[in-house]
Each structure stands twice: as C-alpha cells, then as structure tokens.
Amino acid sequence: MPAAKRKAKTAYHHGNLREELVTQGLAMLESEGQAALTMREIARRTGVTQTAPLHHFEGKAGLLAAIAALGFRMLFDQRMQAMKDRRDPEDRLMAVLLSYVEFARAHPALFHLMHGPEIPDKSRFPELNDAAIRSYSVLETAVADYLLAHEGNMERRREATLAAWTACHGLAHIMTSPQNTPTYVLRKDPAGTARAIFDIFIHGMGTGKR
C-alpha cells in the first residue's frame, strides 16, 4: 500500500485526522504565512485525499477557525502558567498582561489570524468562540482580583477588563506589526518596554476609587 494511503487509513482509524490537519495548518501558518494555507496543500502534507479535510471543516474558513481556536487554547495555557505560584494580585495581573504580548511576539502569524478579518464572526464557530471566551476570562479574573484588593469591590470589573485588553492587545499588535512599531521598542528591550507600559496602566487603573 502506498505510504500516503497507509497514513490516511491510520489517521481515520484513530480518529485523529482533524487534529493532524490543524497541527499541520498551524505549522504552515507559522513557517510560510497564511497565503500558503490551502486545503489541498494541507491534505497533501498530511497524506490524505484532497476531499478528506472537508469531512472535518466547513471549507477553509472552518479550518482557519480551528487553528485560531488552538491559538486561544495555547494562550490560555500560557496565561495560566504565567500566574502559577504568584499570589499578589498586582503580580498576577502583570503576568497575564505580559504573557499576552509574549504570546503574540512568539506567534505573530497565529496572533493575527486569531484577531484578523478572516474570521469576522467567532460565534459561527463554537469551538473558537468558547476558546476565546475562556482565555479572556483569565484576564477578567486577574483584573477583578486586583480591583478587589485595591478598591474593596469589583464594580468596575467589566470596564477595567476591556481597558486591560485594549492595552495588551494594542501593544501586542504594535509589536507584531513592524510598520507601526517605533524602532526603539524592538531594538532596545521589547519585554522591558511592555512591563513599563503595563506598570503605568495598572497603577493608573488603581486610581479609580469612588
């Protein structure tokens, strides 16, 4: 039996073809860019027929959504790892904000897919929508804990979380878009710059007592 057919049979038998296709798609995205991502090429590299991916995804948009969902799960894990063994609410919030920028800088193509126009409506893809909400909830919890520690209540939780997301997402986008990035940011110390900016944001957020 030819190797490609033998691999396809194994993938179907173990029920892991969808995962293999997503993994292959992510590898192509990060090494060759989104333009290289085609259903035909991913099928070829995975060793299955050209129609096999259509059994698992609603066209290319479905495949991109699955890759983006994987990205949000990776981001969730990175945020949780960043907070591990940290007890101080301010330290935990800083860790969550920094981990977002670190993730974006480590996976720029994936980061832009997760937030780009290719998937304008996440609600069409429950797996992606759930993964995005779960990742966002880590930030919301960190913000709520900080507000509780510094203000004694969490009344501003939603607005403060949106502000925090705007800060970290905006900086991540700037740092992964060279045409928009001041040269000193990338040349000098991106991580240190991010920490300094988030320090300003966190202490500014703490002045909102009413």
Image: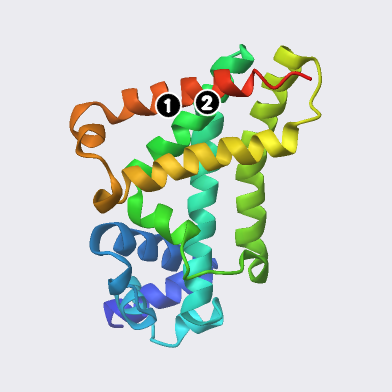
The residue shown at (62%, 24%) is 205
Dot 1 amino acid type: Ile
The answer to the question of whether label 2 and label 1 lie on touching residues, with beta carbons closer than 8 A, is yes
Mark 2 vs mark 1, CA separation in Å: 6 Å
Quadrant of the drawing holding the N terminus: bottom left
Q: Is residue 111 above or below residue 185?
A: below
Check disc 2: other Cα within 10 Å, few if <14, some if 14-19, many if 20+.
some
Residue 46 placed where, x, y %? 35, 71
Q: Which residue is mark 1?
A: 197
Q: Is residue 193 left or right of residue 21?
A: left
- Res 195 quadrant in image: top left
| 176 or 131: nearer the viewer | 176
Dot 2 amino acid type: Phe
| 74 or 196: nearer the viewer | 196
Q: Does residue 84 appear in the picture of this structure?
A: no
Q: Which residue is mark 2?
A: 201
The residue shown at (46%, 83%) is 52
Q: Is residue 115 above or below residue 63?
A: above
Helix, strand or loop at label 2? It is: helix
| 143 or 62: nearer the viewer | 143
- Res 184 quadrant in image: top left
The residue shown at (52%, 69%) is 119
Residue 86 placed where, x, y %? 57, 15
Quadrant of the drawing holding the C terminus: top right
